[in-house]
Image (cartoon, rainbow, N blue to C red):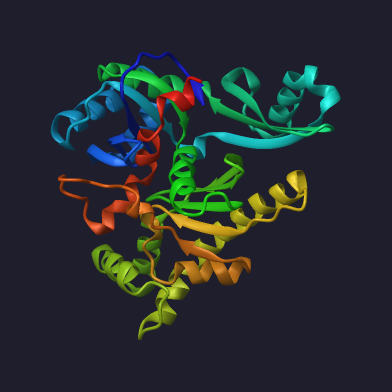
């Protein structure tokens, strides 16, 4: 989590992803939504803007979102920015207490070994999250500097003040901790429109992340190709039938399983890293599936069977109170989990 600067004002969340941006203002003590909105974007233009801090597309899109697409009020220009998790890296490792003075060297070794980007092109941070008399547990986060610079420039270009930048999966974890027995060691599978982010949440910290470049839109295309039908019809079959029993189950399941198996493969890699590098007899106790691409009936049972551990689609909406505001349609609610987590950062928790 990168702290940029601070003034005593409420914070709003801004989630930047490959396919769109969302904004939300929340009273975190009551989980009351004060305002929210979203805007779908052109993925190719987003990519160009993320790769070039001078590209105006993201800043113009944020301005458009704030001007035309907000329900309720935001009440602040101080922003917690969610960075696309798939472009960030988080890893946890252990060190003997006697090596604490050389922790920076250990972080750099970890970056060199496991991150396919040169150290001088990254912003890297670390935190000691556990300490025993013999051992330190350190979480290391690294983000391409161009990505951070592009997001921060876009926020400033929309006349907002960026206060914090963090991977979006950290914000998802914040909501799940508060709503879904987040004290348990939890594997998070966040299925977005175009990508799936995977993380292990344990004792209040993200220990390791992974991901794969497919999501809910991929599922729709898979069904359309397999059944030779229009994308609109394929989407309906995905959200109404999915993997559940029915006359078309065999064909729909056959269409979905290759992509789902690719997600499972990446999940197993993340679990293996967690077990091998961090295993002190703690085991993952639950799998929570979130995100707009999780709206496939039967997907929880699929992951339960594949991973042989309890998996379910998380529904943190009972925690968010929209008050007098018009709520998002049921099918669109999952897309706001990340931005709710960004918006629910409490000042005193950050600046203590």
Residue 275, image x and y in percent? 73, 51
Identified at 58% across, 20% down, the residue is 121
> Which residue appears farthest toward the front when viewing the image?
29
Q: Is residue 295 left or right of residue 98?
A: left
Task: Work out which residue is located at the far bottom of the displayed protein and give it.
Answer: 247
Could you tell me if residue 144 is visible in this image? Answer: yes
* Pick the front one: 326 or 191: 326
Which residue does the image show at 48% across and 41% down from the upper left? 169
Residue at 38% x, 66% y is 296
Q: Position of residue 320 (x, y in %)?
A: 31, 47
Q: In the picture shown, does residue 245 fall above or below 232?
A: below
- Residue 54 lies left or right of residue 287; in this view the side is left
In x, y percent, where is residue 221? 36, 61
Quarter-of-image position of residue 262: bottom right
Q: Is residue 273 left or right of residue 21?
A: right
Residue 78 image offset from top left, x and y in percent: 32, 21
Q: Is residue 215 left or right of residue 108?
A: left
Q: Nearer the viewer, residue 117 or 334?
A: 334
Work out whether 343 lies above or below 121.
Answer: below
Tally of marks:
0
- Residue 48 lies, with reference to residue 326, above or below; the image says above
Whether residue 40 can be seen here: no
Q: Nearer the viewer, residue 167 or 78?
A: 78
Give the residue at x 28% y 26%. Answer: 57
Quadrant location of residue 307?
bottom right
């Amino acid at each position: 989590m990168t702290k940029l600067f601070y003034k005593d004002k409420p914070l709003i969340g801004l989630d930047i992803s490959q396919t769109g941006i969302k904004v939300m203002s929340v009273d975190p003590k009551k989980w009351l939504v004060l305002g929210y909105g979203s805007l779908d974007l052109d993925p190719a233009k987003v990519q160009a803007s993320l790769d070039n801090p001078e590209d105006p597309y993201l800043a113009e899109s944020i301005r458009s979102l704030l001007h035309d697409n907000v329900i309720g009020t935001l009440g602040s220009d101080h922003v917690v920015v969610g960075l696309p998790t798939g472009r960030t890296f988080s890893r946890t490792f252990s060190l003997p207490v006697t090596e604490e003075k050389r922790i920076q060297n250990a972080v750099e070794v970890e970056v060199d070994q496991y991150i396919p980007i040169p150290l001088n092109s990254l912003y890297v941070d670390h935190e000691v999250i556990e300490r025993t008399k013999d051992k330190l547990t350190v979480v290391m986060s690294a983000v391409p500097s161009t990505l951070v610079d592009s997001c921060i420039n876009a926020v400033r270009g929309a006349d907002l003040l960026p206060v914090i930048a963090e991977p979006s999966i950290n914000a998802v974890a914040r909501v799940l901790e508060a709503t879904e027995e987040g004290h348990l060691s939890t594997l998070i599978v966040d299925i977005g429109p175009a990508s799936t982010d995977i993380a292990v949440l344990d004792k209040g910290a993200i220990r390791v992340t992974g991901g794969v470049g497919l999501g809910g839109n991929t599922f729709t295309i898979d069904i359309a190709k397999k059944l030779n039908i229009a994308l609109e019809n394929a989407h309906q079959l995905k959200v109404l039938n999915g993997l559940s029993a029915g006359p078309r189950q065999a064909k729909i399941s056959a269409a979905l399983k290759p992509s789902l198996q690719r997600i499972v493969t990446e999940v197993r890699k993340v679990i293996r890293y967690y077990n091998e590098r961090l295993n002190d007899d703690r085991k993952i106790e639950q799998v929570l599936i979130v995100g707009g691409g999780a709206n496939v009936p039967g997907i929880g049972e699929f992951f339960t069977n594949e991973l042989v551990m309890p998996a379910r689609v998380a529904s943190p909406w009972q925690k968010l109170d929209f008050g007098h505001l018009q709520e998002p349609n049921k099918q669109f609610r999952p897309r706001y989990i990340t931005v709710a987590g960004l918006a629910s950062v409490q000042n005193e928790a950050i600046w203590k």
